[in-house]
């Protein structure tokens, strides 16, 4: 994954809803992601982001789910990713 040197969190699409379908035959999961501006409600003109559809193999879905759970556990423990710089 590419590592950004500058923060764009203010105009980053935020996942607000999702849907899933899956197929044992293709061993695929199709994910429908609903995206909104992360600053919606805080700025006068929020940016529109298109909804996304993507497919992934079941093994990639397991890998992604584990990584997401690890991140959520770290957040619950009060940790930040090492590359995140907190500005005061």
Image (cartoon, rainbow, N blue to C red):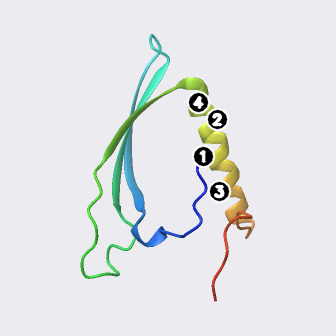
Which circle, 1 or 2, is nearer the viewer? Answer: 1
Mark 1 to mark 2 CA distance (whole Å): 14 Å
Q: Which residue is identified by label 3?
A: 72
Mark 3 or mark 2: name the one nearer the start of the chain.
2
Mark 1 to mark 3 CA distance (whole Å): 19 Å
Mark 1 to mark 4 CA distance (whole Å): 14 Å
> Height in image: 54 above or below 18?
above
Q: Quadrant of residue 73?
A: bottom right
Q: Which residue is identified by label 2?
A: 63
> Height in image: 34 above or below 43?
above
Q: Which residue is identified by label 1?
A: 1
Residue 67: percent from the left, percent from the top? 66, 45
The quadrant of the rendering that contains the C terminus is bottom right
Which circle, 3 or 2, is nearer the viewer? Answer: 2
Left or right of 22: which side holds 68? Answer: right
Mark 1–mark 3 CB contact (< 8 Å): no
Mark 4–mark 2 CB contact (< 8 Å): yes
x 61%, y 25%: residue: 59
Which circle, 1 or 3, is nearer the viewer? Answer: 1
Task: Rate crowding at label 3 as few (under 14), some (14 to 19) or many (20 or more) other CA atoms within 10 Å.
Answer: few
- Under circle 1, the secondary element is loop
Mark 3 to mark 2 CA distance (whole Å): 14 Å
Mark 3–mark 4 CB contact (< 8 Å): no
Single out the residue that lies furthest toward the front: 5
- Counting every numbered tag in the picture gives 4
- In-front residue for pair 88/6: 6
x 37%, y 51%: residue: 17
- Under circle 3, the secondary element is helix
Mark 1 or mark 4: name the one nearer the start of the chain.
1
Task: Rate crowding at label 4 as few (under 14), some (14 to 19) or many (20 or more) other CA atoms within 10 Å.
Answer: few
Which circle, 1 or 4, is nearer the viewer? Answer: 1
Mark 3 to mark 4 CA distance (whole Å): 18 Å
């Amino acid at each position: 994954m590419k590592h950004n040197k500058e923060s764009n969190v203010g105009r980053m699409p935020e996942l607000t809803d999702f849907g899933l379908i899956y197929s044992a035959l293709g061993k695929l999961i199709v994910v429908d992601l609903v995206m909104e501006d992360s600053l919606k409600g805080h700025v006068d003109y929020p940016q529109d982001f298109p909804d996304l559809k993507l497919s992934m193999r079941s093994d990639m879905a397991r890998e992604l789910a584990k990584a997401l759970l690890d991140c959520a556990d770290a957040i619950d423990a009060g940790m930040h990713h090492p590359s995140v710089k907190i500005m005061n």
